[in-house]
Amino acid sequence: MVINELFAGFGNIFTPLNLLIFAGALVLGMLSGAIPGMNGTMTVVLLIPLTYVMDATTGIMMLAVIYAGAVYAGSISAILFRVPGAPEAIMTTLDGYPMNQKGKLREAISTAVFCSAFGGIVGTVFLILFSPMLSEWAYRISSAEFFAVILLGLALVTTIGSGNVTKASMMMAGGLFIGVIGLDPMTARPRFTFGSQTLMSGINFIPVILGVFALSEVLKQLRQEGQMIGGDGGGEIDMENASSGGIFPPVDYIKRFSRILGLNSVLGTFIGVLPGAGATTGALFGYTFGQRIVPEKIRKQFGTGVPEGVAAPETANNAACSGAFVPLLTLGIPGSATTAVILAAFILHGIRPGPGMIQAQGELVYTIFAALLLANVGILLANKLIVRSFVKIRHIPEPLLLSLIVMFSAIGAYATRNIVFDLWVMLVSGVLGYYLEQYNYPIAPLIIGLVLGPLAEPSLRRALIKSQGDFAVFLTRPISAVLVVLSVLAFFIPLLQDTGAGQRIVDKLFGVEEANS
């Protein structure tokens, strides 16, 4: 039954008009993901009016493909210029850009392409086979469990502390504080706004990301005169070796990343299933979790430019992209910001996602499934052309290139909410990020706190309201209790690493000991 429906979905795509729209959507999604600030969500919003003149199946298929392409392509500019093209690529910058600086551009991009496609395909397979089961699981997740999941993600931040748990925790706390500025999500009372109407809407994380990653890198390059941005010491690049375009990856990729591919694909899918989490949260979890499950020798090199540091977030965020369609299609609840926009497209076409949609709108649903599978294969095929175009940007004179990066970052920061205040946020974040890195304060924990904090607070508050202020609710529910215990272990294990006791626990759990020897 499922196979027949899926083949019917492929049949819908392989009509001349739909195939042309599919190809255009994939290229557009990849371009929008690769351009800083012009993410998939914004592109989907802009193209919703275009779906008016299309059949519902064609229009929504187009939006889904754009989303899948944009989630991957954010890694292109992240690796080339340390500028996340989309929020989902935040963690890819941590190792992708250092790999580029080491002259390993081809390996970084090949790793991102293969792992993105693998994670996306696995996530889509889960979506096809287990949508009803996953939707029931998501429906049963209470506020206590959701908060415990986010708490685990915050606890894992100690992994990326540059060897200093204190600095990582301080930065995470800073991100959590920035996240609470604005209106209280439960009472709508202003917090830390100091009477400013602008701060009522809070501080958006997109300008912060563009500031601490893009603008701070520009400032660093200006300080280091004569050094070409993007690494490689300004030398020539072998264009044939700088990009990957084959469907079949090197066999050693599958062997080297087997643990990350297996675990992070599943992890990313389940993160995507959680309403509101999305691919960005999947990338944050994927990176921190991935660092826990690799051999010790590689673990210590995370953040300095290792392929595993690219593979972990890219596998998870693309799996989460597919997983985000589960609550959208089966519960009518968006799993991410982009699927929330796609939900609007459904409603505009007179379709209300929810229980029974797979039976009532099977043709539409399985066309989306088929499109997501083809999009991830298409990422491998179209990647070479897209990456070649962006690699050529490196031949632009450095002053002009730095100016373009600042310009695109400013456009991206402003376009998010169309207020000048966000430009100031980007500027301040960039200067702050530049000086924090000079004193070896990791930037990633700040972003993790800023992204996950606003997700955690409403769940914490709702759980406590339901339990009448009794914190025991997090320990009396089995799933949340297990996650809280894991969070405590995840936070304190790094403190025990000097003795080796903490990491031995993790190594035994995930079978890493053999790889260490």
Image (spheres, rainbow, N blue to C red):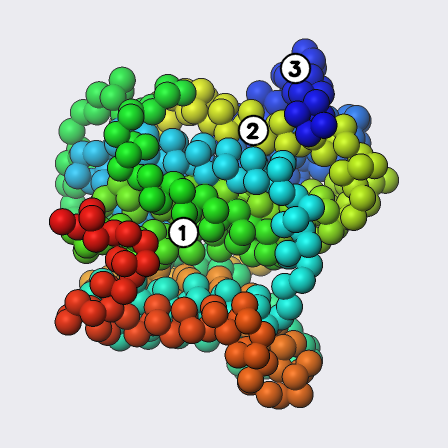
User: What is the spatial separation of the Cα atoms under label 1 and label 2, in whole angstroms?
Assistant: 21 Å
Horizontal side of 513 relative to 485 (left or right) equals left
Q: Is residue 403 visible?
A: no
Look at 55% across and 84% down and name the residue there: 472
Q: Is residue 77 rendered to the left or right of residue 161?
A: right
Q: Amino acid at mark 3?
A: Phe
What label sits on residue 373 in the rendered view?
2
Query: Upstream in the sequence, badge 1 or badge 2?
Result: 1
Residue 455 in picture, x, y percent from top left? 56, 66
User: Which residue is label 3 attached to?
Assistant: 14
Q: Badges 1 and 3: C-beta atoms under 8 Å apart? A: no
Quadrant where the N terminus sits is: top right
Structural crowding at the residue carrying mark 3, measured as other residues with C-alpha within 10 Å and reported as few (<14), some (14–19) or many (≥20): few
The amino acid type found where label 2 is placed reads: Leu
- Image x and y of residue 295, in percent: 22, 51
In primary-sequence order, the first of circles 3 and 2 is 3
Question: Where residue 438 sits in the image (x, y, percent)?
Answer: 20, 63
Q: Amino acid at mark 1?
A: Gly
Q: Which of the two residues, 147 or 94, is positioned nearer the viewer here?
A: 147
Is any atom of residue 114 visible in this view?
A: yes
Instruction: Note whether 354 is above or below 212 in the view shown.
Output: above
Q: Nearer the viewer, residue 33 or 165?
A: 165
Residue visible at 36% across and 64% down in the picture: 156
Identify residue for label 1: 286
Callouts 3 and 2 close, C-beta under 8 Å: no
